């Protein structure tokens, strides 16, 4: 292949340092040997981000430290901001991708539906239907806020709805796995035109 036509590697690194959090992260959308290492200090958040990366087929390293003595809000929100920045950088001008992705994923009695459009228009509709206020050290409202933050910051269009489920852990995990499969489809390279405008930007 002519070097001038070789697509750039779809990788990104990003650091965010504020008075509330310090986060260092790296993302590879097409790893030869996927590696995942997540450490946020919030076990459930680690689990969800690892599930997302695993089923999307990504390599993701993310180390976060923050003011967990206050609550989980700043760490969860800033992890969403960092992941959004990584996605935006790794996708470049977003040309040559499928753009749309959707999935329905069951996890035991839970079932979730997710659809994404990676055009750079911020929109997020997230309905998790969580009954308990906390899932481990991650609050239900910050689980929703995390997903909204990723979509609105990257930006892209996101629809998440958990359709069934009695167990909140299952409901949330099925949502993240659905998002993973939808993203895996949407970032897939294509030679076809995916916008009548000629740009996803």
Image: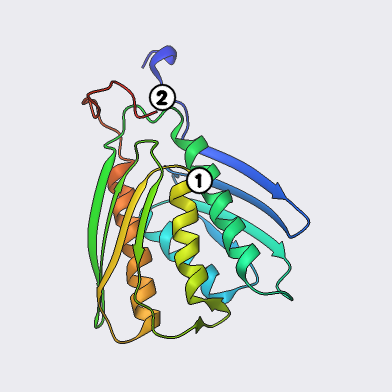
Q: Say whether residue 16 is visible.
A: yes
Q: Residues within 10 Å of mark 2 (few under 14, many from 20)?
A: few
Residue beneath the point at 53% across and 69% down: 45
Residue beneath the point at 25% across and 67% down: 105
Expressed as whole percent of the image width and height from the top left, the position of residue 42 reads 60, 73
Residue 153, which numbered label?
1
Q: Residue furthest right?
A: 19
Relative side of 95 to 103, left or right: right
Residue 7, which numbered label?
2
Vertical side of 63 occupied by 15: above or below = above
Q: Residues within 10 Å of mark 1 (few under 14, many from 20)?
A: many
- Judged from the image, the secondary structure of the residue bearing numbered disc 1 is helix
Expressed as whole percent of the image width and height from the top left, the position of residue 199 reads 33, 24
Relative side of 192 to 121, left or right: left
Residue beneath the point at 39% across and 84% down: 131
Coloring scheme of the render? rainbow
- Judged from the image, the secondary structure of the residue bearing numbered disc 2 is loop
Residue beneath the point at 38% across and 82% down: 168
């Amino acid at each position: 292949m002519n070097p001038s036509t070789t697509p750039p590697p779809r990788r990104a690194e990003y650091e965010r340092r504020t008075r509330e959090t310090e986060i260092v992260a790296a993302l590879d959308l097409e790893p030869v040997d996927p590696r995942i290492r997540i450490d946020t200090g919030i076990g459930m958040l680690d689990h969800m981000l690892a599930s997302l990366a695993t089923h999307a087929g990504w390599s993701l390293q993310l180390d976060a430290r923050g003011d967990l003595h206050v609550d989980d809000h700043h760490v969860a929100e800033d992890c969403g901001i960092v992941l959004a920045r990584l996605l935006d950088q790794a996708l470049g001008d977003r040309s040559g991708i499928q753009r749309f992705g959707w999935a329905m994923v069951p996890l035991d009695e839970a079932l979730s539906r997710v659809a994404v459009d990676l055009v750079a228009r911020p929109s997020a509709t997230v309905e998790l239907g969580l009954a308990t206020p906390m899932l481990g050290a991650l609050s239900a409202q910050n689980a929703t806020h995390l997903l909204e933050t990723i979509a609105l910051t990257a930006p892209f269009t996101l629809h998440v709805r958990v359709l069934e489920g009695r167990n909140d852990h299952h409901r949330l995990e099925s949502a993240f796995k659905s998002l993973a499969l939808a993203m895996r489809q949407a970032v897939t390279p294509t030679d076809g035109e995916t916008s009548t405008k000629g740009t996803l930007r």
